Image (spheres, rainbow, N blue to C red):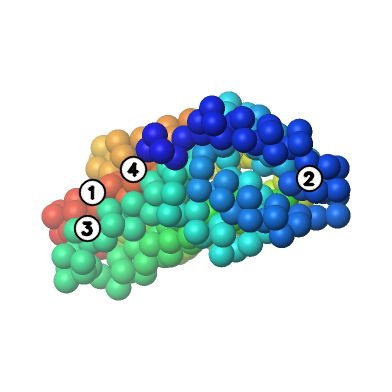
Amino acid sequence: MAALLSTSALRRRLRTAIDNDSPGRRLWSWSGPSQEAEEQVAKAAASLLSWEELQLMLKCVAEWQQCGSDHIKTGYRPACGSVARCFASWTYAHNESGAIIFVLLPFYVFSDGIPARWSIASTADVVVCTAYAIGVTTCFVLSTAFHTLMSHSKDIYLSGIKADFHGVLALMWSSVFPLAHNVFPCSPATRDAYVGLTGLLAALCAAATARPDLGAVDLGHHRAVLFAAFGLAAFVMPIGHGVVLAVDGGREVWDRVGGWWVLGTAGWNCVAVFVYWAKVLAAALSYAKAVVVGFDYRHAQELVC
């Protein structure tokens, strides 16, 4: 890891190269990168640079490369304009490596223990769990693509961050399928009504995110509040409705949905207001546990409608 970190020698070489070069041969000019500049950027991509070093090397680095990462001072990848170079960054450490790795890990977690349950699952169980799996996959694929390609260019960054938001919405909406199924196991119409209602809310959130005034990269906390409100409605409304209808009170509903794990998921959604990206992985894993706990409880009770 130490070999990947910026060194004093690298800093001196960068400053010397810029100070001694003529204006027409800067590493990056308004007319675009020269072949020499591209070669030096490609070499620098294998080293972690601080924000100050990145600005020094490229001279006209745009502020979008640090949007949402104001407190991250090292590990930046130079904007390369190449999809291949963006994916090549998987081979070395940089300031987005953690986000990429930890988003990919749940693919292993979600596959553990689920196949063993298919033998006792009903058709409805399979449908709602598949819907949730599709939402999780969509979210993680879009998130991985965004964090990988965000060093491509400003246009790709802006498109990618909106796609990442929409992936989170897909994950949150898909979580309603198993929740409503467990709360209303004998009322498919009520279950489908909640799925449709929250789907409409998700679409409205997606439309709001796509608006220029809410889609700006520096308004992440505003979008997080919007998403947290949607998540609260998606969890609280169906569970509250189920408690009101339950003959034996809320305890049965709480057990059917894996209540403590659902509560943990809601907590991570609230954390998103302060640390937007951190909640996605934790909330998805917490809710996956809730789905499994709810599934096991319902089948252990052998509920008959």
Give the amino acid at mark 4: Ser
191 relative to 201 in the view: left or right: left
Q: Earlier in the sequence, mark 2 or mark 3?
A: 2
State which quadrant residue 184 falls in: bottom left
Q: Residue at x 65, y 36 (%)?
A: 14
Q: Which of marks 4 and 2 is nearer the N terminus?
A: 2
Give yes or no for contact between labels 3 and 1 (Cβ–Cβ under 8 Å). Answer: no
What crowding class fits label 1: few (fewer than 14 Cα within 10 Å), some (14-19), or many (20 or more)? Answer: some
**Residue labelled with disc 4:** 286
Disc marking residue 293: 1
**Residue labelled with disc 3:** 112
Q: Which of 5 and 8 is in front in this view?
A: 8
For label 1, the SS is: helix
Disc marking residue 26: 2
For label 2, the SS is: loop
Q: Which of marks 3 and 1 is nearer the N terminus?
A: 3
86 relative to 80 in the view: left or right: left
121 relative to 24 in the view: left or right: left
* In the rendered image, the vertical position of residue 30 relative to residue 141, given as above or below: above
Q: Earlier in the sequence, mark 4 or mark 1?
A: 4
Q: Position of residue 233 (x, y in %)?
A: 53, 42
